Amino acid sequence: QLQLVDSGGGLVHPGGSLRLSCAASRSTLDYYAIGWFRQAPGKEREGVSCISSSGISTNYADSVKGRFTISRDNAKNTVYLQINSLKPEDTAVYYCAAQRNLFRPCVLAETEYGYWGQGTQVTVAS
């Protein structure tokens, strides 16, 4: 069964950057769309970005467009989320998730994703 491990979070100053990684084990990511979600304290989890299994299709929440970039390296069985120009409101636990989806574009709906990483904390503060 697919297992996901997300990493790369940390404490950064406003305007800083991080690269989050989502590494898969026990199965190949080739047949999965991958999404990144985040949950801030006291708020519901929200979709941030996703990438189709082929990597051709991507999707971003309006709040992160132009600052976040999702990519995947299927040879390394890993998906990345480059996050730039970080703002305090980006502070959250970030989760990657996988949806078995070979042909359709990805969607930012967490109910579509059946496999989840454990989360990595991103804190943006001065």
Image (cartoon, helix red, strand yellow):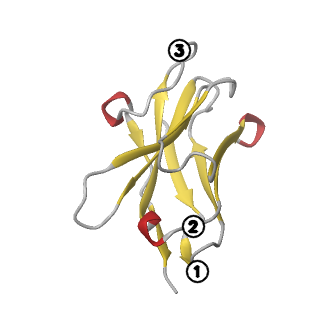
Q: Which label sits in the foreground, 1 or 3?
A: 1
Circles 2 and 1, Cβ within 8 Å, touching? The answer is yes
Indicate left or right for 19 with 90 as reference: right
Q: What residue is rendered at 62% in x and 25% in y?
A: 53
Q: What residue is rendered at 53% in x and 50% in y?
A: 64
Circles 3 and 2, Cβ within 8 Å, touching? The answer is no
Label for residue 111?
none
Q: Amino acid at mark 2?
A: Leu
Residue 73, image x, y percentages: 74, 39
Residue 71, image x, y percentages: 69, 41
Indicate left or right for 109 with 122 as reference: left
Residue 29, image x, y percentages: 61, 32
Tell me the residue that label 1 is attached to.
13
Q: Earlier in the sequence, mark 2 or mark 1?
A: 1
In-front residue for pair 91/87? 87
Indicate left or right for 36 with 113 as reference: right
Tell me the residue that label 3 is attached to.
104
Examine the rendering and report whether any part of residue 53 can be seen: yes
Q: How far apart are the alpha carbons under marks 1 and 3? A: 37 Å
Q: How far apart are the alpha carbons under marks 3 and 2? A: 30 Å
Label for residue 86?
2
- Tell me which corner region of the image, top left, top right, bottom left or bottom right, holds residue 51: top right
Q: Earlier in the sequence, mark 1 or mark 3?
A: 1
Q: How far apart are the alpha carbons under marks 2 and 1? A: 8 Å
Q: Earlier in the sequence, mark 3 or mark 2?
A: 2
Q: Which label sits in the foreground, 3 or 2?
A: 2
Residue 47, image x, y percentages: 41, 43
Q: Amino acid at mark 3?
A: Arg
Query: Height in image: 89 above or below 118?
Result: below
Q: Amino acid at mark 1?
A: His
Which residue in the rendered view is the most extreme toward the top?
103
